[in-house]
Amino acid sequence: MSDVRKESKEKLLFVIQKHDSRNLHYDLRLESEGVMKSWTVPKGPSMDPKTRRLAVPTEDHSMSYNDFEGVIPEGNYGAGTVLVWDKGMYTSTKDDGSTFADSLEEGHATVLLEGEKLKGRFALIRTKRGWLFFKMKDEFALSGSDILSDKPDSVKTGRSLAQVNEQESPSEMRDFQ
Ligand code: MN
């Protein structure tokens, strides 16, 4: 297939933080032009192509927060517990030379994720009702799977949210979303 073109593409960072704040949600963050473009995915990612998840755009994040795992104290934005649910590299898979930022402007991005949990092609599509994030059909897709309950813990430390909450002292994080 297009392996040569794929390999010529720039590899960028992605991270998904599991964040137990006012509600439990998953923050999808993809590097673009020096920042982490971010979406809140209330129901979390899925490896089943039939499961399309709402993804609500949030503020760009600093890349320096990518590794953050800990407790944000009450009274701060995002107060609650955070763990690094998945991380790795990604490439934007459009073959027309457009960047991920171009694709977002068009409202239609496809990415190849090389995470520890999420692998293969995913789409981020803007619809009338908001952005959708979902697995595309490929050899990594798993019908009927539930990766959120199969692999709930941190890829950084192996801890659960409860363990992070127990073991970490609150740390001030400015504008963590
Ligand atoms: Mn969040």
Image: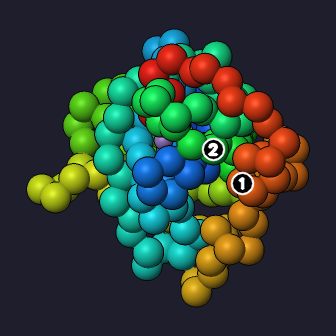
Q: Residues within 10 Å of mark 1 (few under 14, many from 20)?
A: many
Question: Residue 84, percent across and down?
Answer: 70, 43
Residue 43: image location, x then y, percent: 45, 65
- Quadrant location of residue 83? top right
Instruction: Tell me which residue sits at (74%, 74%) in the image.
Output: 150
Q: Which residue is mark 2?
A: 81
**What residue appears at the point 72 percent right and 54 percent down from the top-left corner?**
161
Q: Secondary structure at mark 1?
A: helix
Label 2 is placed on what type of residue?
A: Thr
Seen in the picture, residue 23 relative to 60 is either above or below; the reply is: below
Q: Are marks 1 and 2 in contact (CB under 8 Å)?
A: yes
**Nearest to N terminus: mark 1 or mark 2:** 2
Q: Which residue is mark 1?
A: 161
Determine the secondary structure under disc 2: strand
Q: Nearer the viewer, residue 138 or 40?
A: 40
Does residue 124 appear to the left or right of 127 in the view shown?
Answer: right
Q: Where is residue 45? Give x, y as percent.
A: 53, 61
Q: Residues within 10 Å of mark 2 (few under 14, many from 20)?
A: many
Q: Is residue 119 above or below residue 138?
A: above
